[in-house]
Image (cartoon, coloured by chain):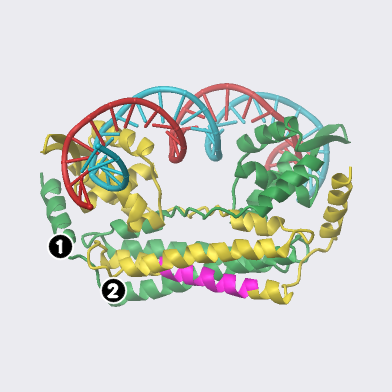
Chain colours: A green, B yellow, C cyan, D red
DNA sequence: AGTGCCATGTAAGACGTTACATGATTTG
DNA sequence: CAAATCATGTAACGTCTTACATGGCACT
């Protein structure tokens, strides 16, 4: 039910159309913590309206129709109940770390370095964006929201620091020690070799 | 296709049953970066076998059947191709930050503090777990894998630090300044009030 | 003898994305 | 007047989770 609540949250800032909501999750602050596509948004809006959480005000803007949605009393109450509930712990799904875990010594280390450097570039860009728009003077960010931005900033800084450390270790061959009491890496390489040579 | 690749990765460590794979994603290192349920695993295993990436060796263990899966040559090649590709940027979905973004001044700040403190507890527990099992002497973690663990550790430490800072700010009423050039929070509270009083 | 873990699998359904279809308005 | 953007929506598809169904083994 969380997607619905995120929609209610966006509408609470100001009445919005489906298009507005999408762009909020695409280019604005919220893109850092959530994503959403039209295929989700429009059906959910319909549904939320049918259940009385929101209502639509069609505005004729030129000859074209626009549906601005706004929260009903029921919608406000639902939103605030949701805000009051303890948030569930986020599940992270990051391919980079799956790949790190599965890496083995017959793989080219340079390749891994390039993965890390690409990630660094992406995170650096995001970090600049976060910093910029934290003080662009136009976006609405509440005091509490600013705390969230600050967290995004710290997280990105940490990631970049970690990448720098890791790349250096890789380049110097100064990797951290492995933990491998059963010599699994050795076995892995043996199994691999026997399959690849067949 | 990423889930399939994660399964191949787990099997690469050592031949495993569906049950083993599940537990790897539930209680082991990988739980930090990925999740998976039986409803995904068994059908995927069947599929991967049909497509020649893995094969099964049924072992009679007592009277009970067990299917250990192992990578084929095709499977090893597919796994290593996947490792060679640049990982996609992770999409984070964190309810806590959606809630932070949607918080407003008529909501109880104490409630928010309790959300933050709960998050801190959960992350502290995870951190202890990560540290413990980084040196438990039994789990297999390669040198490169250790780098991933180190990242998880740093991320959790950062989060905890951020929570401490934020809770202090909330308790001292020393919140960061908001950015609200259009007085949206004022409008929001007005719209809210008019709905709640109706 | 009972609890809990090991072990395999299926079915129904929620959930979400991609791609498609359509058309008006604004901007260069 | 072309291209980009604003704007709404659907259909098909893939993905994943929950709940169910089943049963052996190990330990206490």
Percent position (x, y) of residue B142? 26, 64
Which structural element holds mark 2?
loop
Near mark 2 (Cα within 10 A), the count class, few <14, some 14-19 or many ≥20, is some
Residue A175 circle label: 2
- What residue do we see at 20% from left, 65% from top? A180
Q: Which residue is mark 1?
A: A183
Q: Residue B89, relative to residue A5: is it above or below?
A: below
Q: CA distance from mark 1 to mark 2?
A: 18 Å
Q: Chain of mark 1?
A: A
Q: Position of residue A142 (x, y in %)?
A: 75, 63
Looking at this view, is A79 or A47 the one in front? A79
- Answer with left or right where residue A8 lies relative to residue A109: right
Residue B128 vertical placement versus B76 (above, below) = below
Quadrant placement of the C terminus of chain B: top right
Dominant secondary structure, magenta: helix
Q: Quadrant of residue B67?
A: top left
Q: Magenta residues?
A: B151-167
């Amino acid at each position: 039910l969380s997607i619905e609540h995120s929609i209610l949250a966006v509408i609470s800032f100001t009445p919005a159309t489906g298009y507005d909501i999408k762009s909020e999750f695409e280019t604005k602050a919220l893109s850092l913590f959530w994503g959403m596509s039209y295929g989700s948004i429009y059906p959910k809006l319909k549904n939320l309206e049918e259940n009385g959480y929101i209502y639509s005000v069609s505005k004729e803007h030129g000859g074209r129709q626009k549906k601005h949605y706004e929260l009903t009393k029921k919608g406000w109450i639902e939103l605030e109940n949701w805000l009051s509930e303890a948030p569930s712990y986020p599940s992270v799904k990051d391919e980079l770390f799956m790949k790190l875990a599965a890496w083995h010594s017959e793989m080219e280390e340079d390749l891994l370095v390039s993965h890390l450097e690409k990630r660094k570039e992406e995170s650096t860009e995001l970090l600049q964006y976060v910093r910029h728009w934290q003080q662009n003077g136009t976006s609405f960010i509440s005091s509490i929201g600013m705390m969230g931005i600050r967290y995004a900033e710290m997280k990105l800084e940490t990631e970049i620091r970690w990448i720098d450390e890791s790349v250096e270790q890789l380049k110097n061959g100064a990797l951290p020690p492995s933990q491998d009491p059963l010599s699994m890496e050795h076995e892995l390489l043996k199994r691999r070799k026997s399959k690849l040579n067949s």
